[in-house]
Image: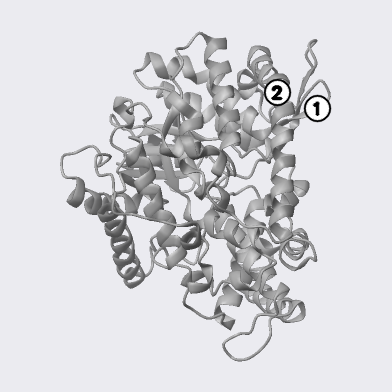
Amino acid sequence: MITPDGIEAAPPHDPQFADVLSVDALRFVAGLHRRFEPRRRELLAARRERDAALRAGGTLDFLPETREIRDGDWNVPPPPDDLADRRVEITGPTDRKLVINALNSGASTFMADFEDANTPTWRNVVEGQRNMIDAIERTITYDSEVDDHHYELDEDTATLIVRPRGWHLDERHVKVDGEIVAGALLDFGLYFFHNARRLVDKGSGPYFYLPKLEHHIEAALWNEVFLHAQDELGLDRGTVRATVLVETLPAAFQMEEILHALREHSAGLNAGRWDYIFSTIKCFRDRPEFLTPDRDDVKMTVPFMRAYTELLVRTCHRRGAHAMGGMAAFVPSRKDPSVNEQAIAGVREDKQREATDGYDGTWVAHPDIVAPAREEFDAVLGDRANQIDRTREDVEVSAGDLLDVAATPGEITEAGLRNDVAVGFQYISFWLGGRGAAAINNLMEDAATAEISRSQLWQWIRHGATLADGRTVTRDLVREVLDEETARIREEVGEETWAAGRPDDTREVFERVALGEDFPEFLTLVAYEKVD
């Protein structure tokens, strides 16, 4: 599809989705691109400059130039009624059946994910937007050929929140004036154009989660996008509400500035724990004092993670904003009740800690985890919608606390190395096949958790880390383990499934992001070259 005004879009895979890519919708996206793309490119260049400064020996600290914001007397506006109580939020991709199940799960909200849980094939992008429209109109249904079951919405459903892609991702299926558009602007633009007025008319609003921000100026760009979009469609400023995932280490030093940058659109912060661990490794990947132990040992209770999570609650509640807890990634087993019993006990402990610390809600990845997570927050919140009034003035966190990775207990073991290899390889295979979220070993793995796995391998190789058994982690050792793990996976899944998983492409991407001399910024940037 090429319009007379410089817009080029690939056709949808099915003509019934053509209305998603209407000329008016594409013109709205084009307006966003023309106005904000130059600034996006400037901010991405600034990221590269800051990364170079860290690699040259720099560090992170609270910004002296924004001290007035941190010391100032200001608050974000109170949440709208359907965002006041967020004690359990379920997340997942925009697949039609999964959208219905998530909205029916009993969770307070559902974050429909166009980012880490979604492979941005053109089919997934367009069909996901169609599913959002149908969900808001309550016409969404699904008839499964697998279990011969009909799926439709219950009377009461979760409040819908959408996560567009991060600023770093392009969408090559749409060009404006010959330039590829940003995935973030396409995801936001199509959703907002089609649904913002619909949502307001139904007593809700266009609510968003904003991922991968590394600086408050990146939040300020989103604020400009919101202002422009609301003005274009004749909606009141402040109709949009956005929660920011604090899932990069630099953002942890700018939480107040990020809330302030979004002004009347701010709805809180979320402790995006998995990407945060990945970002910590990435920022200081060249420094041996930031070496991390096995992935499973980097728990929320280790010193640098504890500092981050407590600071987030204090910051949010000081400014009247929601503080949202991290993901419970456990996926129940249909075959082994003992696995479920042990894992759900761990989920309860994690959610009890969050609720006791002052969090207003938490994330889960599976409908079966909604109830136990809710019970732990109910025990603390009772009939209150949230605990924003609990300001946690007792919390004091320094820059050194946020950077104290060296105090993380644990070892680097062969089992941990094998897990990183197996998870990283399998996730990339699923991603290339169009599935951005996949259950592996009873955990819901998405791009964030896969990033931890591949970045740890790169970090361990870079510093010649020593395994608990005395061996040094080298590329040759990792390739040896990769050969063994892929042989095991191939035997377990069978030849047909193995071949369908694009093993050659998967291995090429895996070796590029985990074993290369350079460190790719995001594995999805490398893998996207092989999509569609």
Give the percent coordinates (x, y) of residue 188: 57, 28
Q: From the viewer's perspective, is 460 left or right of 296?
A: right
Provide the secondary structure element on which disc 1 rests.
Answer: strand
- Classify residue 76 as left or right of residue 519: left
Q: Nearer the viewer, residue 53 or 211?
A: 53
Calculate the distance from the C-alpha at mark 2 to the C-alpha at mark 1.
9 Å
Crowd rating for badge 1 (residues with CA inside 10 Å; few <14, some 14–19, many 20+): some
Q: Quadrant of residue 426?
A: bottom right
Query: Residue at horizontal 60%, vertical 76%?
Result: 418
* Image marks 2 and 1: residues in contact by CB distance under 8 Å: yes
The percent position of residue 345, horizontal first and vertical second, equals: 29, 66
Residue 348 vs residue 60, the one in the foreground: 60
- Which residue, given by chain and number where applicable, does mark 2 sit on? 33
N-terminal-most mark, 2 or 1:
2
Which residue of the protein is positioned furthest toward the left in this rendering?
383
Report the front residue among 27 and 352.
352
Mark 2: amino acid: His
Q: Secondary structure at mark 2?
A: helix
In the displayed structure, 160 sits above or below 340; it is above
Q: Amino acid at mark 1?
A: Glu
Residue 18, given in percent of the width and then of the height, sits at 65, 20
> Which residue is the site of mark 1?
179
Would you say residue 96 is visible in this rendering? no
> In x, y percent, where is residue 476?
77, 80
Residue at point 61%, 62% (across, down): 281
The answer to whether 247 is drawn above or below residue 294 in the figure is above
Residue 20 versus residue 168: which sits nearer the camera? 168
Can see residue 311? yes
- Left or right: 286 as drawn, with respect to 20: right
